[in-house]
Image (cartoon, helix red, strand yellow):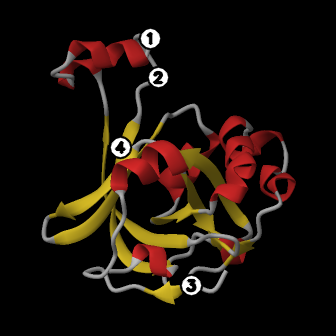
Amino acid sequence: MDLKNIGINSFTVKAHDLWANQWLLLTSGDFSLGKYNTMTVAWGGFGTMWGKPFAHIVVRPNRYTYQFMEEFDDFTLTAFPKAYRSALNLLGTRSGRDGDKIAESGLTPIPSEIVAAPGFDEAELIVECKKIYKQDMGPQHFVDPSIDKMYGGFNYHRIYYGEIVNVLGSDKYMT
């Protein structure tokens, strides 16, 4: 897809709709080394922290992508047109430990402009991020006790904040 550089002050999204209904791919690793993994994410957000534009995402320690998030310093978030929903579903339900799920999805990894983690040729939005913070979630921090029911008492996410260092997208994501 033909994407344009979008300045951070021109980047616009319907944040809840993007995360909850459209989904994104979180990809971490190094494209040039051929060492990366991706997973579908539906929990996260965009904002400003410490004077920097950021994206935050959460990954459970049992996910294969977790080891890539721990080893590498950056990640990408990519959004796709609705035609790719089945590919995102596959990438969210299969593990990269068990085979080449990216090839099976039919998506094409491409090098990013700034970070080592790849984007995807079919994407309509690529957000490149450098990790700046991480912390483990736990029930002792939930103000609303009903949140713990989503975890069954175990396998809590690690939250990652990434400074947004580059955005490429279609006109849909530009003011």
* Residue type, mark 2 in image: Asn
Residue drawn where x is 59% and y is 47% of the image = 40
* CA separation in Å, label 2 and label 4: 13 Å
Count of numbered circles in the view: 4
Measured from the top left, where is residue 62 in percent x and y?
57, 31
Residue in view at x 39 percent, y 69 percent:
130
The residue beneath circle 3 is: 3
Q: Are there few (<14), some (14-19), or many (20+) residues within 10 Å of tag 4?
A: some
Residue 81, picture quadrant = bottom right
| Residue identified by numbered label 1 | 152
Question: What is the three-letter code of the residue carrying label 4?
Answer: Ile
Residue corresponding to mark 2: 155
The amino acid marked with disc number 3 is: Leu
Q: Name the spot of residue 23 as percent of width and height, x first.
A: 53, 49
Residue under label 4, please give it.
Answer: 159
Q: Are marks 1 and 2 in contact (CB under 8 Å)?
A: yes
Density class for disc 1 (Cα within 10 Å; few <14, some 14-19, many ≥20) is few
- The residues bearing labels 1 and 3 have C-alpha atoms spaced at a distance of 41 Å
Q: Which residue shows up at 58% across the image and 59% down it? A: 27
Q: Give the CA separation, mark 4 to mark 3.
A: 28 Å
Please rate how many residues cluster around mark 3, counting C-alpha atoms within 10 Å: few if below 14, some from 14 to 19, many from 20: some
Q: Amino acid at mark 1?
A: Gly
Query: Mark 3 or 2 closer to N-term?
Result: 3
Q: Nearer the viewer, residue 141 or 14?
A: 14
What's the residue at 13%, 65% (across, down)? Answer: 50
